[in-house]
Image (spheres, rainbow, N blue to C red):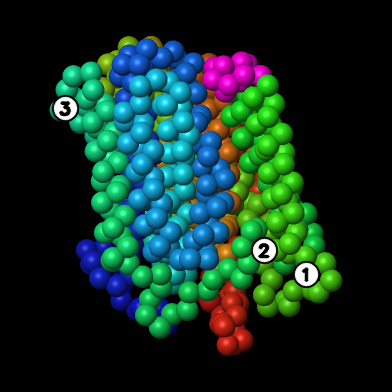
Amino acid sequence: MRQENKFNMLSFSGKMKILHLSWMAFFISFVVWFNHAPLLGAIAKSLDISMAQVKTLLILNVALTIPARIIIGMLTDKFGPRLTYAFLLFVGSLPCFWFAFATDFTQLAMARLLLGFVGAGFVIGIRMVSEWFPANELGIAEGIYGGWGNFGSAAAAISMPTLALFFGGDNGWRYAVALSGLICLVFSVIWYFNVSDSPKGSTYFKSKKMGGLEVTSKGDFFFLLLMKLPMYIALVLVGWKLSPHGVALISESMASVVYVILAAILIYDCSCVYKVNKEIFHTPVPAIQRYQFKQVAAVNILYFTTFGSELAVVSMLPMFFAQVFKLDMVYAGLMASMFAFMNLVARPCGGWLSDHFGRKKTLMFVIAGLAMGYCAMSMINSAWPLLIAVLVAMSCSFCVQAGCGAVFAVVPLIKRRLTGQIAGMTGAYGNTGGVFFLTVLSLVDYSTFFLVIAATAILGIIAILFMNEPRGHMAEINDDGTVELIKVG
């Protein structure tokens, strides 16, 4: 049974201890993941890299998080959040140190590519929190986890330039980045020795099979294969950006090799999904064990727009404010951090609204607000008062972050033992959106960039119309064959 202690944010015991440690782990992973964004000006000057190479670093930072979130989701469902998060934080500190002491663009690029794995930590906490909180508290709990953890990107925007100035000199940015890696390394140990996968006496339902997401009908099998394509297209975009058509980090022939490898991985991925699900083609899944994959597809599309745009905007907003309003990069970073600052309240608010007013209604409201917010941001120019521009960005951000919170108020209610994998795929779609929007940014001006994001909200609204509001119970089978019903609404 779940612990029945009250939802008290001032408590640091029971489920509340798990929530606090979870958002702290997520917070640290995001500080490390975005520790470069507010320092790009200093990094570019230090290593004499071009603006095209700077934009490439932004894309590389989110590229590997696409497959990483899928992989980490599988590992979480199989081995549990305790071990998986400790491992990820420990290993993730290593490319952080590499980036801190890189001596050329190639080293920066490789380290940034590997640091994409740190961004997959979000998935682990989603499963952890879902194990410790009941359905009527899950939206707000996941919102706090996601919102306070996501604030790590804002904390990076504020703290990294400050630390760089504190250390001083041409290498100040290096010591600031290295310090974030050290914190990540230390917290991996703190996490491991202070959490458990589920409350005492509660069953941690593990995924029965590794290698692919389980589905429960033949139609959903083909739907899953279709939903894999955008993630691979995003990785092709990364390869194209690194080719001579982009920053020429790799040759045309090497880019072709990358495309062939991605095609081979896609074929292998699809074959693994078939192996996991081949029984459904001759043995129907009992009705009580089924779930609708369209729910997964809907949250994927919504997270593409919400978190995908957040990733892109958090990465580019310091440069945007610096160039449009002619600001010093440190000051521009502080102004831009207001976008991510909204995570503190907006994600929990999106979760709370979902708990109290329904998942679909909340999503419809915040996605419409997101579209209007980005349309407003597309009109910002140097004639605007800086304060008004920041307020518009914060208003837009509120809807973006609330949308993220509302999405993950749905994810844990689809299928408990697959929550890590579902969260992984949804998170990967967020990164797919980040790659897509950052690629658009490299090709168009700022105004068009914001309008493209607003246009994708239409797909989100269509996805919401096809969703089902989570109601009743979902069933999971214990090891002894007994059925456990878990309330979802």
Q: Nearer the viewer, residue 341 or 82?
A: 82
> Residue flagged by tag 1: what amino acid is it?
Glu
Q: Position of residue 465 (x, y in %)?
A: 67, 51
Specify the quadrant of the image occupied by residue 416: bottom right
The answer to whether mark 3 and mark 2 are in CB contact below 8 A is: no
Which residue does the numbered mark 1 point to in the structure image? 279
Would you place residue 404 above or below residue 410 in this image?
above
Would you place residue 71 above or below residue 158 in this image?
below
Q: Nearer the viewer, residue 17 or 179?
A: 179
The answer to whether mark 1 and mark 2 are in CB contact below 8 A is: no
Label 1 or label 2, whichever comes before in sequence order: 2
Residue at far right of view: 282
> Residue flagged by tag 3: what amino acid is it?
Phe
The answer to whether mark 1 and mark 3 are in CB contact below 8 A is: no
Which residue does the numbered mark 3 point to in the structure image? 167
Give me the disc on residue 214: 2
Residue at image point 60% right, 77% down: 475
- Region in magenta: 242-252
Residue at image point 56% right, 51% down: 70
- Mark 2 element type: loop
Label 3 or label 2, whichever comes before in sequence order: 3
Residue 196 in magenta stretch: no
Q: Is residue 368 visible?
A: no
- Mark 3 element type: helix
